[in-house]
Image (cartoon, rainbow, N blue to C red):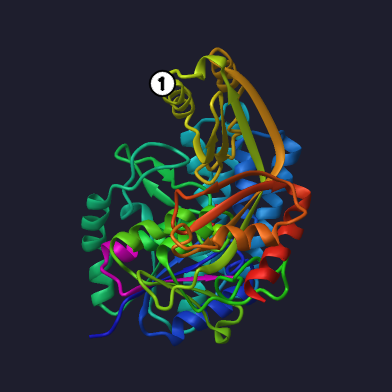
Amino acid sequence: MSKLSVAKFGGTSVANFDAMTLCANIVTTDPNTRVVVLSASAGVTNYLVELANGCDKTRRTEILEAVKTIQYNIIDKLQEQAQIRAEIDTLLNHITALAESASLATSDALTDELISHGEMMSTKIFTQLCVERGYPAVWVDVRDIVATDSQYGKAVPNDEKTKSQADAILKPLLSAGKVAITQGFIGRNDEGKTTTLGRGGSDYSAALLAEVLNADDVLIWTDVPGIYTTDPRVVPNAQRIDTMAFNEAAEMATFGAKVLHPATLLPAVRSNIPVYVGSSKAPEQGGTWVTRDPQPRPTFRAIALRRNQTLLTLSSLSMLHAKGFLAKVFTILAKHNISVDVITTSEVSIAVTLDKTGSASSGADMLSQALLDELNEHCHVQVENDLALVAIIGNNLHTQAGVAKQLFHHLEGFNIRLISYGASTNNVCTLVKNQEADDIVRALHAGLFE
Ligand code: ASP
Ligand code: MG
């Protein structure tokens, strides 16, 4: 029996005709790739988010023109243009109407409806491109498959309903030898309205479809040939990691590596589906396999960097010997939908950094005045910006002697604002100044990997 791979191509992979052609080559040369999940062409989602947030007529016209140009530039190079151009025009007209509504009054439901159009357009065009190569590609509206709740901007899929819809709609196509081309990022709620899974959600869509279809693997095609020991733009000597474990990759993604959406791994991890990350521009360069238990498992695997972190320090004299202060503070944070990343505590204060990875598709600011006011009723609040998280990722970090000595040795000479060590076997986290972050990553990389 042949294998089933679900391939996902990111925004840069489908940014223009040449990039899309490389994706088509990958799909058509791999007989196992029979479900293809696409992001919107690079830049399109950002434009649509701007429209959804409401803007004046001049800006609306400008954005519409820019989005149209991105899509038309691809269509211009197709063999059969009339029908696909008409379909894209229809979608562009929807965008125009929705953007006008949004400029009068925005809503989360309207935002999701509007920004879903990026994936609708990229998939329509890519299907046509594959068909022109004689490939049995069929366009599938993923909203008929991925069922979600109604949390617009960060909707949560209903796995069971998604599975039964995939069985009913996708399975027969696959059995008939077709290759399904469909959208990442979007779904539909019980009311029949379009939802989105949060920015970068296409990876999650691909993993979810792989799970419900019992696929053999998920192939994440992006613009880098795999996961590196650190960001090669910061450290040109960074090395590609050939295999790594789910929990190491999840830590990396959570702490800043751009290649995988943190939640991507969720359906893959729970169903033990290997995930591959490679470059659609250079597939011959190979990539990284992320699996449950690859061997070997080195002590130090990688260094992740996440810039622009906010640190909240909450102090209360009544915390001295008091019970329940943490519970109170975390209740307030939860109420405002904030999840925290790193925590340290002392007798009278706690310091937390905010996790921005789960923020809504619209990118609304997390630290609202309402939140600060409510916290202020219970404690003194200090906000520090311009910080960066540098996370050292590895294995059994907290059970081995000498790990701290090594790290501190390489960190000599830098001011470390906060450290979190011991909660996770897979990471040690440090919070540092934004402007020192690159140097710190270089020092650590040189010391641990070069
Ligand atoms: N197009 C969406 C975004 O830019 C989803 C994705 O690319 O994964 O966030
Ligand atoms: Mg993306």
At label 1, the amino acid type is Gly
Position of the N terminus by quadrant: bottom left
Up/down of 137 relative to 430, above or below: below
Up/down of 121 relative to 109, above or below: below
Q: Residue at x 53, y 38 (%)?
A: 343
Residue 211 located within the stretch drawn in magenta: yes
Q: Residue at x 58, y 25 (%)?
A: 314
Q: Is residue 183 visible?
A: no
Q: Is residue 19 left or right of residue 326?
A: right
Count of marks placed on residues: 1
Residue 281 placement (x, y as % from top left):
61, 78
Q: Is residue 214 left or right of residue 151?
A: left
Residue 199 placement (x, y as % from top left):
53, 49
**Residue that badge 1 annotates:** 324
Question: Which stretch is magenta?
Answer: 209-222
Q: Residue at x 67, y 64 (%)?
A: 444
* Most distant residue in the top direction: 377
Secondary structure beneath disc 1?
loop
Residue 345 located within the stretch drawn in magenta: no
Residue 75: image quadrant is bottom right
Sort mark 1 into few (<14), some (14-19) or many (20+) by Cα contacts within 10 Å. Answer: few
Q: Is residue 133 visible?
A: yes
Quadrant observed for ligand 1 in the rendered image? bottom right
